[in-house]
Image (cartoon, rainbow, N blue to C red):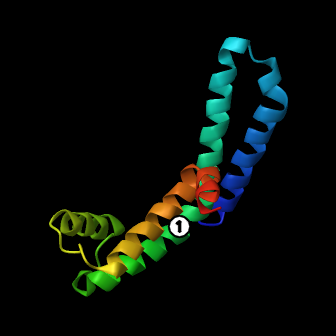
Amino acid sequence: MERDKPAAADLLKTARSLLRGELLAYLPEAQKLNGLMIANAMAIAARELEIVPGMEEEVGGSLRAFYPDMGTATLSELCNRFAGDIRKGHFDDDESAYSALLGNSRKRIAISNPRYLAASES
């Protein structure tokens, strides 16, 4: 099933390209914004299919470093514990926790709005 993910991302990219390049011009003016929003959602979904599996593995690995006692925990369980510990102030002065959080945030922005990330880094 993992083999299907790049194909799915390619299908989304092709459909988005067709929507923007050919179909959008034929939409009534009142529907063009909706067409653009659909194209944007397709781009985000394609990036998620390409990026998220590796990102989840990387994020899980960085969180497991904080919680070696949670070796079999899911990513969701690790994130929940990490978030709870942040709220409790356990990582207030921990540079590695800040780096892990910043890295995860940058990866998520790369999926949802890569142009914003590129502009903020220049």
**In this view of the protein, which residue sits in the foreground, 101 or 64?**
101
Name the kind of residue labelled 1 in the image: Pro
Q: Residue at x 28, y 74 (%)?
A: 73
**In this view of the protein, which residue sits in the foreground, 53 or 35?**
35
In the displayed structure, 119 sits above or below 67; it is above
Residue 6 at what x, y percent from top left? 68, 61
Q: Residue at x 23, y 72 (%)?
A: 92
Q: Residue 17: which quarter of the image?
A: top right
52 relative to 42 in the view: left or right: left
Query: Can residue 1 be seen?
Result: no
Residue 12 at what x, y percent from top left? 69, 46
Q: Residue furthest right?
A: 22
105 relative to 93 in the view: left or right: right
Q: Which residue is mark 1?
A: 53
Give the position of the C terminus as an image quadrant. Answer: bottom right
Residue 69 at what x, y percent from top left? 22, 85
